[in-house]
Amino acid sequence: MWSDLNAKHLLAFRAVVEEGTFGRAAERLGFTQSAISQQVASLEALVGQSLFDRPSGPHPPTLTHAGDRFLPHAMGILERITAAEHDLDRLARGVTGTLSIGTFQSISARVLPAALRGLYAEAPGLEVSLEAEEQQELRLDAIHDGSVDLSFLIAESRDGFNDYDQLDYMYLGADPHVAIMPASHPPGPVLVSDISGTPLVGQPPSDACGIIIDRALERFGVTANYAFRSHDNAAVQGMVGAGVGPAIMPLLTIDTSDPTISVRALEPPIPPRHHAIVWNDRRSLSPLAKRFVELTVVVCDELLAVGNDVPTAT
């Protein structure tokens, strides 16, 4: 039956065609001549037709009409096998493939550019799709249903990522919360108690960062009176610069070069948010995904080391 045909049959057939004799084909493949003859005979039995005329004496074998018809098919199959081997080898070495990543604003602005630059330098043939989503629950759904290979998450504590079922993760570091004030604000730290009752700007109550900040303020007995809330970090920062009110934000979300705002430490400090990159523990990571995780760790080691250096009063 044709379903019993395998690559060894085709390799023997091709070698005889290209080398001209069974003896030279055997030398090329490292087999005995009788082994090559058996492979070709087995192939002919499977296809039900003779593929070579075998004249007696010193004359070389020649293709029959059936063999001539079969040759391009055999060559095409072997080419596809070689291409598959090459493709999977590149995939195994992490130099090609596809990668989908769930992300959010501050990661997209501060972490992904450097990590992807490094990945593209090593694997220029890769295809990356980025799914930007501010709602953490939706990023979690994408990991669980396989829509993305990797995603960035935040938690209130380093151990908080252990609370998610079916997830493996790599911890990336802590991101301190700071106060954003107008540039004219006097130097020195901002007392959390001074914020109570004043108009604030910040992130929506459904946002993972907004939840962390609001819970922390509540523990300090601070009444948060928001005049403006938005997922857009730049909009929040712009409102602070315009004088609408101060904000409490993770340092990674802030453009500290903005001349209209001033970044100040909080007293007492609000616990930082914690970052991790996660994946579904029921799916194996590709070499490309593993390499991206490694590069992300390097980038975050630098960024979050700076981030932990919270500005203090001068």
Image: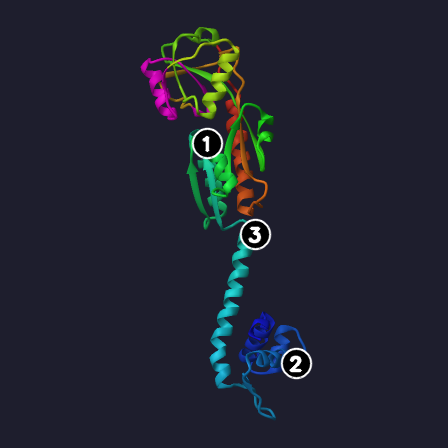
Q: Residue furthest left?
A: 242
Q: Is residue 212 visible?
A: yes
What is the quadrant of the N terminus in the image?
Answer: bottom right
- Residue at disc 3, secondary structure: helix
Q: Is residue 260 visible?
A: no
Q: Nearer the viewer, mark 2 or mark 1?
A: 1
**Residue 174 rendering spot, x and y as whole percentages:** 54, 24
- The residue drawn where x is 56% and y is 77% is 13
Residue, disc 1: 107
Number of disc labels: 3
Looking at numbered disc 1 in the image, what kind of residue is underneath it? Answer: Ile
Give the distance between the C-alpha atoms of the residues marked 2 and 1, in whole angstroms: 63 Å
In the rendered view, does 91 fall on the left or right side of 232?
Answer: right
- Residue at disc 1, secondary structure: helix
Residue, disc 2: 33
Looking at numbered disc 3 in the image, what kind of residue is underneath it? Answer: Ala
The answer to which of marks 2 and 1 sits earlier in the sequence is: 2
Give the distance between the C-alpha atoms of the residues marked 2 and 3, in whole angstroms: 36 Å
Indicate how the structure is coloured in the image. Answer: rainbow
The magenta segment: 227-253
Tell me the tag on residue 92: 3
Q: Compared with residue 135, is residue 288 higher up or lower down, i.e. above or below?
A: below
